[in-house]
Amino acid sequence: MTKRMISAAAWETVRDAAGRIRELEAAAHRTLHEASDTAGHRRLLTEKCLLLESLPEAAEAALAGSDAAGGAAFVAGLEDFARRAGLALQLESIFFMGALLYPDDYQDGAPNDLERFLDRFAAA
């Protein structure tokens, strides 16, 4: 499969966000299971969703002036992640917030949906 080309800045922006999302999820897990802090758990998962919602705009800014052909598809994919994150926030569903990015058959240690999406693109 040929990877679509996008600017290095856009790819790195999303890669860094994907790493931050993993950090937020791990902190949320610890907060809930080690400290029994449901409010802190909610706060961290809300932050995850807000970060996902911000990705299309951040990627568009990083793509500004780029002539890489994959930019439109990249932003469109990120808009789908943002839409689902916004829905989770609107519903105030902790389960939905936590399950974002993970298919039903997810195996621990495997890439999540955002990471797999990012793998379809290459930095120019």
Image (cartoon, rainbow, N blue to C red):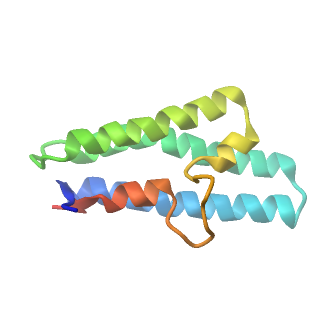
| Pick the front one: 36 or 97 | 97
The residue drawn where x is 40% and y is 35% is 79
Give coordinates of residue 66: x percent, y percent.
Answer: 13, 47
Left or right, residue 39 beside residue 118: right
**Residue at far left of view:** 67
**Residue sitting at x 74%, y 43%:** 95
Q: Residue at x 88, y 63 (%)?
A: 35
Residue 6 position (above or below residue 49): below
Left or right, 76 with respect to 37, comes to: left
Residue 67 on image: x %, y %: 9, 46
Above or below, 105 relative to 56: below
Q: Is residue 69 left or right of residue 58?
A: left
Q: Residue 96: x percent and y percent?
A: 68, 41
Furthest residue to the top? 90
| Residue 108 appearing in the image | yes
Q: How many marks?
A: 0
Q: Nearer the viewer, residue 69 or 2?
A: 2
Viewer can see residue 17 = no
Left or right, residue 66 beside residue 77: left
**From the image, which quarter does the C terminus lie in?**
bottom left
Q: Residue furthest front?
A: 105
Residue 36, compared with residue 89, is above or below; it is below
